[in-house]
Image (spheres, rainbow, N blue to C red):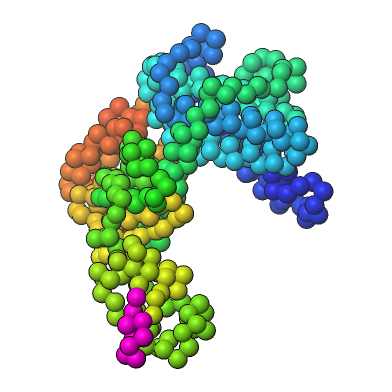
Amino acid sequence: MLADSSPWNNKRFSKKTVSHAKSKVIDTLLNVYSFYSMYAEIDQFNPESDVGGVQTTLDKWIISRLNTVIKEVTQSIDDYDITKGARSISTFIDELSNWYVRRSRQRFWSNGMTDDKRSGFSTLYEVLKKLSQLMAPYTPFVTEDIYSNLVKDSVHLSDYPILDETLIDKQLEQDMNAVLEIIELTRSVRNTVGIKTKQPLAQLVVIPSEKVTLSQLQKYSSIIKEEMNIKEVEFRKDSQDLLQLDLKLNFSKVGPRLGKPVGEVKNIVDKLDEENKKKFIGDKEIQLSLNSGETVTLTTEDVLVEKKGRTGYELSEGSNFIVLLETTLTQELKEEGLVREFVRAVQSYRKELNLPVDLRVDLFVQTDSWLQKVLIKFDELVQRNLIINSVHFESKPDMKSFTLFPFFTFF
């Protein structure tokens, strides 16, 4: 609740308010800890002996963010600004859960203690330990429970975490913020057109603003592909061939200045061809000749510019990027989307049966021949996303029936 507003501000207090604050921060932190403890127990991870491994980009990023947050919170507490510190912690917990842990899940599903898994466990252990120490003045009981389970000692008898400047990578943090912005813009497009993330799409075109360096972002294209289920991510400096520009005169701005000729200027602007529209965007101004022989100069402040994607592409624009998502669905993409829905249904059924997360099972499927061929075609995708031994296309007693939109039923 401190993250929402300063303690001296008036605030309506209710069970719902407390529940919302608890769900947003405390429950999220506990879910991250539960994830760590569950898989650490399965793999018998020991933070003292199972050290090392090769850190991934995500590992380096979350450690960098941890130290940045330690710096922010320590400064906030020193300045007696506890609300600012609470907000930094709240943001970090959201990043830890909804980005780092979610993007790292498959690392913990692999068999045996690989170097990659060891690095993941070590990173998550370090983050949870120092985050508990950092939050201890704010949430003394929850952090005591987490820290004592991790370290077998009291968090309130430990030293407050100390910033390690050498572990802060500002460029990496900026890059990941850019990746997150691209993903949010892409997710917004999917929501607008009603295409779920489980449905793969062919291409995403990203156009950065002038202040963003293309070379810095291209190495993160694989993350964007996986997160947004896109086959190809293309970064371009210019993508006018995919853009449709609609220009409209800003009457509130130019009306008082132009007076009577404003109607004629509007007609000229409405009839501009694509070449002149692009020239206007590039030059940031345009000169128009009126019937009276007078010349009027319009700038970008005088004209409202609406950008749309050309046929087959949908557009979303943020402060640093324009994204264009190809929304045309081929038969191949539709089939893969169907298989991903199949995977989701099986995962839901596993939860319903309360199966151990590490238990490999045999999957029996009864469906028609066409859908069977599709599942065989995408067997590698099924095996990668489900913890199973194999898929058998045969009937069994007491099978569960599923209907997957738009036409897929299996038992």
x, y (%) of residue 193? Answer: 37, 62
Q: Is residue 341 left or right of residue 76?
A: left
Where residue 97 appears, as percent x and y from the top left, is 53, 36
Q: Is 174 a magenta residue?
A: no
Q: 121 and 149: which one is in front? A: 121
Q: For residue 313, what is the image quadrant? A: bottom left
Q: At x 43% / y 21%, what residue is drawn?
A: 55
81 or 389: nearer the viewer: 81
Q: On screen, 382 above or below 278?
A: above
Q: Position of residue 195 (x, y in %)?
A: 35, 56
Pick whichever, 342 or 197, lies toward us. Answer: 197
- Horizontal placement of 395 versus 198: left or right? left
User: Nearest the camera: 193 or 264?
Assistant: 264
Q: Is residue 12 above or below residue 147?
A: below
Relative to 308, does residue 352 appear above or below in the rendering? above
Q: Could you tell me which quadrant the N terminus lies in? A: top right
